[in-house]
Image (cartoon, coloured by chain):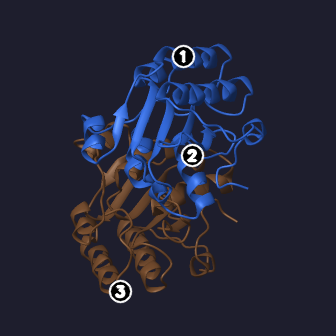
Chain colours: A brown, B blue
Amino acid sequence: MARFPMPDWLNTMPKPIILATDEERILYAILLSRLNVEQGTGGPFGAALFNLETGELIESAVNRVVPESCSVAHAEMCAFANAQERIERFTLMSLGSVGIYSSCEPCAMCSGAIPWAGVKKLVYAAHRSDAESVGFDEGDKADQWEEKLRARGIDVIGGLCQQEAADVFKLYATVGGTVYNG
Amino acid sequence: MARFPMPDWLNTMPKPIILATDEERILYAILLSRLNVEQGTGGPFGAALFNLETGELIESAVNRVVPESCSVAHAEMCAFANAQERIERFTLMSLGSVGIYSSCEPCAMCSGAIPWAGVKKLVYAAHRSDAESVGFDEGDKADQWEEKLRARGIDVIGGLCQQEAADVFKLYATVGGTVYNG
């Protein structure tokens, strides 16, 4: 069992998945967020790690805060920890160039975790305002946090397919999902 | 087994432990950091959760990044996740007023995690400059991050028994410990 167990529907998805573009990869992360809401298995957030050179999916994760009783279990954190556990390394750098694709702008915790995880790129879809519009709290991040990641050699693309991700928050509000840190 | 397994020496320490003052509690967290170095079971960081009213120790944790192959496994994160797993809640608020006592100023990830964890107080010993002096990276935090935690209703005391904690970093450097994110 992984450190952060994922739902059965995610564990049984066919593999391998190879996606060539940032847009395909972020849409995959958004799909995870949508399925997590529709299946009732956690909050409206998904994240995926891809090898930036080969396009191979390395790890998929969804928000598991409520089902796992764990405030740490944001999608990005689960992706990092579960991938590292599998490869038995504390950094993803040993896999080459790895990118984290997140359905939403990472919160203060997750953006702080990114430099430690060993990724070379962050792509996210929804903006913090989308998450906040349904009551989530994104925390207090460094000013110009994206520039600070870039200064560490981590490329950042934000707002890619933002509308598709924002729609998942609206769905979550419609189904009355728990807002666990508002 | 806990989500973030702790070393045997920590799991077998006698309980209960009840400590009345912030100074006793932070010295306990520093003791954990020192034992983690001396026993060779992780990085030079310790953290403990105490009930702020009764003084009872709720959870003890040490840095487990290298032995657990997990960039997330900072002492504070392990304390939060393991305590929440045990009580089967995603917030510590259900335990009443809980404080996190950390041997070092929390990094960007851990300080971002604090508001989600459900604690009412942060007490830390060493400053970021102490950790950086032996090569650790604390990340990019919000300006006036302590004030921002206080604005969220989380009391913050920093630099309590700073010298005792800084001495543990010196010990770690002396024994040639791994600096995993420098």
Along the line of sight, the residue nearer the viewer: B73 or B85:
B85
Q: Is B128 or B19 nearer to us in this picture?
A: B19
Front of the two marks 3 and 2: 2
Report the Cα–Cα distance between label 2 and label 1: 21 Å
- What amino acid does circle 3 point to? Val
Which residue is disc 1 drawn over?
B164
Which residue is pictured at 52% across the width and 67% down the height? Answer: A61
Position in image of residue A53 (x %, y %): 49, 57
Q: Chain of mark 3?
A: A
Could one spot residue A74 in this view of the protein?
yes
The image shows residue B17 at horizontal and vertical percentages of: 65, 37
| Residue position for label 3 | A175
The location of residue B70, given as percent across then percent down, is: 60, 47
- Quadrant of the drawing holding the N terminus of chain B: bottom right
For image coordinates 66% across by 63% down, the residue present is A2
Residue assigned mark 2: B79
Q: Is residue A98 above or below residue A6?
A: above
